[in-house]
């Protein structure tokens, strides 16, 4: 969607695209997105999102490259927008959301 609106889009994939769906279909969707110009960061796990220095409103994202194992190297880049889609269950424990004023539903 964002790429279709003219934005430079990157997708971080922890394991495989659309892992809850059929493997072949997930791969086909990712291949089509890549053919349209969406950039994929495979085996990438985000570890931090913070405001970048300056007044541009950009976000600095740090992620771990898991392609070489769990002690993967950290990388950082800056983006205008970050959309987090983490699956069907919220995995919010340990993110520090309460520290920044986010109220959580007890089931999340």
Image (tube, rainbow, N blue to C red):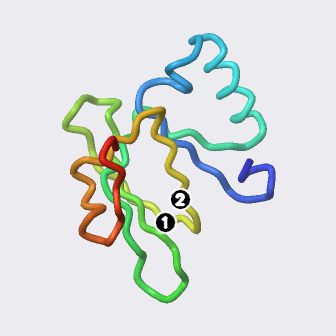
Q: Nearer the viewer, residue 66 or 100?
A: 100
The quarter of the displayed image where residue 96 is located: bottom left
> Quick check: 48 above or below 20?
below
Query: Residue at 55% across / 26% down in the picture?
Result: 17
Of tags 1 and 2, the one toward the viewer is: 2
Q: Is residue 21 left or right of residue 14?
A: right
- Horizontal placement of 19 versus 90: left or right? right
Q: Is residue 94 above or below residue 61?
A: above
Which residue is label 2 attached to? 82
Q: Which mark is residue 107?
A: none
Relative image position of residue 4 (x, y in whole percent): 80, 50
Question: Tag 1's secondary structure?
Answer: strand
Where residue 67 appears, as percent x and y from the top left, is: 35, 30
Residue 99, image x and y in percent? 24, 69
Label 2: state its secondary structure.
Answer: loop
- The residue at which mark 1 appears reads as 78
Between 92 and 44, the one lying in front of the other is 92
Question: Distance from label 1 to label 2 (Cα)?
Answer: 10 Å
At horizontal 36% and vertical 57% (from top left) the residue drawn is: 62
């Amino acid at each position: 969607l964002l790429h279709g609106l003219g934005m430079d889009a990157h997708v971080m994939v922890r394991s495989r695209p659309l892992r809850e769906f059929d493997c072949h279909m997930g791969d086909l969707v990712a291949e089509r997105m890549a053919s349209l110009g969406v950039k994929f960061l495979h085996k990438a796990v985000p570890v931090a999102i913070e405001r970048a220095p300056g007044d541009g409103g950009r976000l600095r994202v740090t992620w771990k490259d898991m392609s070489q194992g769990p002690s993967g190297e950290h990388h950082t880049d800056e983006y205008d927008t970050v959309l987090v889609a983490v699956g069907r269950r919220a995995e919010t424990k340990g993110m520090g959301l309460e520290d920044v004023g986010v109220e959580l539903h007890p089931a999340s």
